Every structure is written in structure tokens, then in C-alpha cells.
Amino acid sequence: MRLALAWSGGKDSALALWTLRQQGIEPDALLTTVTEGVERISIHGVRRELLLRQAAATGLPLVEVRLPLPCPNDVYEQRMTDALGAPPLDAVDSVAFGDLFLADVREYREQRLAAATPPRQAVFPLWGRDTAALAREFVAAGFAATIATVDPRVLDRSFAGRAYDAALLADLPAAVDPCGERGEFHTFVHAGPVFDAPIPVTTGITVERDGFVYADLLPAVTVR
């Protein structure tokens, strides 16, 4: 299988990479959408510089699909199609995603890839896993992540910038999925078994924009 991995920089994509490698599958590339102008990972709001450091730490090539702000869906779909038709993604036959249980999202991804030229297969290495158990497994495996984005309609803004750890999982309201699968929050992973070294980060200011709360994560200087 020649495969690309949709990479958001968050815990689900990191867990998907970890799972694929445990199955003996090494992706050809990571695939990430980056918002033009602000130079941040789309939706998660994490700086592109940190994305580049993540990719380097995985040892995998990174394909960036650049999106305007705002981005109509037809523009998103065309730019993804263009990326799949160009090297190195033109050589893959599958794209893996870290989705867990949202059936409509899975169906959309499958339909879009089936309509590509040539058709591709969508792969979901984490699909159907119990999200509470998966969250605990993430922490126990030695991953480290920070909450980068919070939807304040369902989760208090104070969670932005917090470490994604056992204490945070204990503090999450019962209605919030432990993996944030419904978009309650998004994370940035900066250490763990998919990286050859940690990515030092520090937390800057927290801002509210377009109805979401963002903790601005900054590259940290490593003192030797």
C-alpha cells in the first residue's frame, strides 16, 4: 500500500501514524491544509513553523495544500484534487485519516477519493475505537500535546493552552468527547513515539476569533 496521511498536527493524526507504523505501513507523505496569509494549520490555528518541525521530526515529506480565507468548499475540493494529481501524491493509492466515528465525515472523504483520477481508497486506522480508551492510550504511550483550539460553546475557554494529559481528561465535562471528535477542541502534538525528538513549544496569548478560542503556540528555544 502506498499511502498519504492527512495530518492536522493533532493527537488523532499522530495516533493514526503510530497505528500505521505498528502495522508496518510507512506513509509516503503527510498532507496538511494551511491557510494563506495567516500561515497556520487550517482550523487548528497552529503556526506553520511548528507544522514544519513536526514533519521533520516524523521523517516524512510534507505536502501543504494552501487554502484562502475564507475558503469555499469548491475551492477546497479543487486544491485537494490538484494536490492528489501532483508528485508525490500522484503515486499513492490510499489516503489515511484519523477520524473516529463521524459517519458523514467518513462518507464525504470516501466519495471524494473515489472520484479522484485515478480513484483512491480512504483508510481509517482508528475507526470505531472507544475514544475514552484511546485518549488514555495516547497519554500512556508518552505522547505530549497542548490544547490549541477550543469551541467555547461546549467547552470553557480556560482549557485553551492546557496540556492534554490525565488531569485534563478528568476535568472534561461528560458531554465533551475525550478526543474532541465533534470539534470541541483541537490539539498540537509536540512529543511522542512518532517523533525522533520533541518539538519544544511555549504558550503565548489566548485570543477569540470567529467564534473559537485559540492558544497561540510558539516555538521554544532549546537551551543546551
Image (cartoon, rainbow, N blue to C red):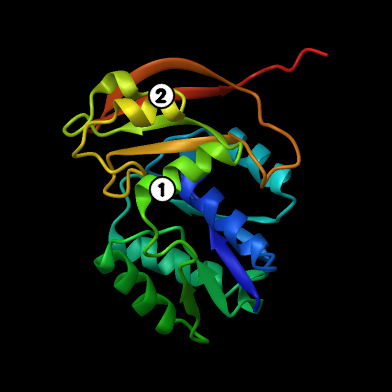
User: Can you see residue 10?
Assistant: no
Give the residue displayed 30% in from the left and 18% down from the top.
158
Taking the image as shown, residue 61 lies to the left or right of residue 118, namely right
Residue situated in front as seen by the camera: 94 or 99: 99
Q: What element carries label 2?
A: helix
Task: Return the residue found at the far right.
Answer: 224
Who's the residue at 22% across and 31% down the image?
Answer: 173
Residue 84: where, in percent of width, then height? 54, 72
146 above or below 68?
Answer: above
Say which amino acid is labelled 1: Ala
- SS at circle 1: helix
Which circle marks residue 198 in the picture?
none
Q: Where is residue 56 in the image (x, y as percent from the top left)?
A: 72, 44
Q: What residue is shown at x 38% (from left), y 67% (from top)?
A: 77
- Point out residue 65 in the picture as x, y percentages from the top left corner: 51, 56
Q: Considering depth in this image, is 40 or 8 the residue closer to the camera?
A: 8
Q: Using the numbered discs, state the Cα–Cα distance from disc 2 to disc 1 in whole angstroms.
A: 15 Å
Instruction: Pick the quarter of the image with the N terminus.
Output: bottom right
Quadrant of the rendered structure where residue 74 is?
Answer: bottom left
Q: The residue under label 2 is which amino acid type?
A: Ala
Q: Is residue 42 left or right of residue 70?
A: right
Counting labels gives 2
Residue highlighted by disc 1: 133
Dot 2 or dot 1: first in sequence order is 1
Q: Say whether residue 190 is left or right of residue 224.
A: left
Identify residue for label 2: 167
Up the image or down, 6 lies above or below 95; here it is: above
Q: Quadrant of the C terminus?
A: top right
